[in-house]
Amino acid sequence: MTRLGELSQQAGPPLESDAANHPRKVLAQCLGYVEKHRDQMDYPKYRAKGWPTGSGITESGVKLYGKRVKGSEQFWNVPGAEAILALRSKWLSEDEASQHYWLGWPPQAVAA
């Protein structure tokens, strides 16, 4: 049994009269979440593989993309936004895939 499970047993089940933020209810909700998502929370394994375990990288990426497509005086249709986000993704990835992308797609003339 996890430490969270032990604490939940000590506190007892939440009562109908408990407020939503009562420690028993909060503890029961947290325990339920951890038990439901246990298979997705193998953090030691993820760290051993060098994988991130926080949301900071994703949040930073969303912020960077948002700045590119939501700037002032910028108006995008869906295909245009998808194209610029794909290019931005390649640029930010800083890996060989971005080099292959640029080498494989020569510039094309655009008719005005």
Image (cartoon, rainbow, N blue to C red):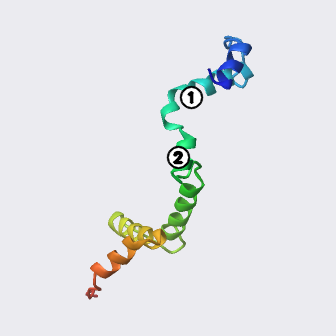
Contact (CB < 8 A) between labels 1 and 2? no
Where in the figure is residue 85, as x and y percent of width and height? 42, 67
Where in the figure is residue 112, as x and y percent of width and height? 28, 88
Q: Amino acid at mark 1?
A: Tyr
Where in the figure is residue 31, as x and y percent of width and height? 61, 24
Residue sitting at x 43%, y 67%: 89
Q: Nearer the viewer, residue 38 or 107?
A: 38
Q: The N terminus lies in which quarter of the figure?
A: top right
Q: Secondary structure under badge 1?
A: helix
Mark nearest the camera among 1 and 2 is: 2
Task: Name the residue carrying label 1.
Answer: 33
Q: CA distance from mark 1 to mark 2?
A: 19 Å
Q: Is residue 5 above or below residue 12?
A: below
Q: Nearer the viewer, residue 50 or 31?
A: 50
* Residue 23 falls left or right of residue 29: right
Q: Nearer the viewer, residue 97 or 109?
A: 97
* Residue 15 falls left or right of residue 76: right
Q: Nearer the viewer, residue 46 or 91?
A: 46
Task: Name the residue carrying label 2.
Answer: 46
Q: Secondary structure under badge 2?
A: helix
Where in the figure is residue 88, as x and y percent of width and height? 44, 71
Q: Amino acid at mark 2?
A: Tyr
Q: Which circle's residue, 1 or 2, is located before the other in the chain?
A: 1
Residue 97: mark: none
Say few, some or many: other residues with alpha carbon within 10 Å of mark 2 (under 14 / 14 to 19 / 20 or more): few
Residue sitting at x 29%, y 86%: 107
On the image, which quarter does residue 43 sit in? top right
Q: Is residue 15 above or below residue 34?
A: above
